[in-house]
Amino acid sequence: MSDDLLNLRNRHLPTENQELQQQLETLVAQARLNEQVMRRFQDAELRMLGVSSFKELLQYVLQEMKETFDLDVVTLAVIDPEYEVRRMLIDIGIPANEYPGLMCLDNPSRFHRLCGTSLAPVLGQYNVASRAPFFPRDTPPASIAILPMVRQKKLIGSLNLGSRNEARFAPGMATDFIGRLAAILGVCLENVTNSERLKHLGLTDPLTGVHNRRYFDQRLQEEVSRAQRQRFPLSCLFLDIDHFKQVNDQYGHQTGDCVLREVAWRIKGQLRSIDVLGRYGGEEFAVLLVQTDMASALTIAERIRHSIAEQRFKGEGDETLAATLSIGVATLHDCNRTQNAETLAQQLVARADQGLYRAKQGGRNCVMVVMPESDKASSVEVR
Ligand SMILES: Nc1nc2c(ncn2[C@@H]2O[C@H](COP(=O)(O)OP(=O)(O)OP(=O)(O)O)[C@@H](O)[C@H]2O)c(=O)[nH]1
């Protein structure tokens, strides 16, 4: 190499070095950014895999995920043709309006119209006509990502992300991270649904199919706390079949079982889906009437009493028999937030049980209300 060339190269070397240094810094910064993004996604995946209930998963996905990924809307669509998820939400005490971001769809047709059969993620501008079902109409996002969740080759729903930033989601963008997030959410959704199903089995009375005492006691605590928070009245009924021993003795245990089943279903038939019914013991049932004052609770108790007394029951064979119920009623109203929820629950149940005892003493086939000790009239009879 000539001296001239060598001098020229030495003069350019510092500039080249500087450029290389800058490129390296940009690459390192990009790598750090990617690492941060990856860590955020990893944390989200671990968080979802760690949840132990359907409610916890909903809270994370519909509330926390928005902050974690700086999104304006996150919704979850679940395909629920048999109403299984919707029934489960009632069973676990989640009112239908508590999570507006959860959408239960009767069938997958909306997805197929939107994503075709490939079930690939859909990214792009929000469009009311085709994408509205997946996002709230009142605050529509500017750009969206609809990420189908597939389990065992079956579409089970989608994770839907929305941003006010038009450029956030555009067709052709890489979907590796968000696609993986939706796949993991699909697994978690399936897990928590299965585990809720198992819990449900452990909380159901096998003979009548209604809930058992464990479930009732659990819900009692929750409903008393909710009544305290929201200042709603909460009523409790204790119901017991009259002279049930005679039914068993006269018609046999199998017919006794038929009557128990039918009584449970007639009681259930008089309740709303948000009310709680449990078989409390042998021939005894307990009901929680949510957001129900004493006057309405009495009307419902009377309706139940009539539904049992007015129509005969079919036994195991051809025989039919009459049955009646005694019912105790108690209401928790104006409950103080500072009072202990467990004590309030115990007092409510004790008063309803006392009402039932008085109904039995009063000749059976009647409804008795027991007021709180502080009230003057301590009990009222309805027949
Ligand atoms: N067939 C059937 N009978 C049951 C079941 N669980 C409890 N029993 C019966 O329910 C009856 C309850 O009898 P008691 O507690 O004496 O009360 P009762 O005869 O209903 O009388 P009162 O409650 O005072 O009106 C008992 O004979 C129990 O064996 C069940 O799962 N199936």
Image (cartoon, rainbow, N blue to C red):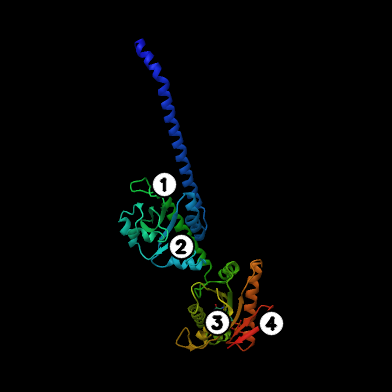
Q: Which mark is residue 376?
A: 4
Nearest the eye: 152 or 99: 99
Query: Mark 2 or 1 closer to N-term?
Result: 2
Query: Mark 2 or 3 closer to N-term?
Result: 2
Residue neighbourhood size for the residue with mark 3, other residues' Cα within 10 Å, grouped as few (<14), some (14–19), many (≥20): many
Q: Position of residue 367 (x, y in %)?
A: 59, 84
Query: Mark 4 or 3 closer to N-term?
Result: 3
Quadrant containing ligand 1 reads bottom right
**The C terminus is located in which quarter?**
bottom right
Q: Which residue is label 3 attached to? A: 301
Q: Amino acid at mark 1?
A: Phe
* Spatial CA span between label 2 and label 1: 26 Å
Q: Which residue is label 2 attached to? A: 100
Q: Amino acid at mark 2?
A: Pro
Quarter of the image holding residue 348?
bottom right
Which circle, 4 or 1, is nearer the viewer?
A: 4
Q: Secondary structure at mark 4?
A: loop
Query: Mark 1 or 3 closer to N-term?
Result: 1
Q: Could you tell me which residue is drawn at 34 percent across and 57 percent down?
A: 127
State whether residue 69 is above or below residue 16.
below
* Spatial CA span between label 4 and label 3: 22 Å
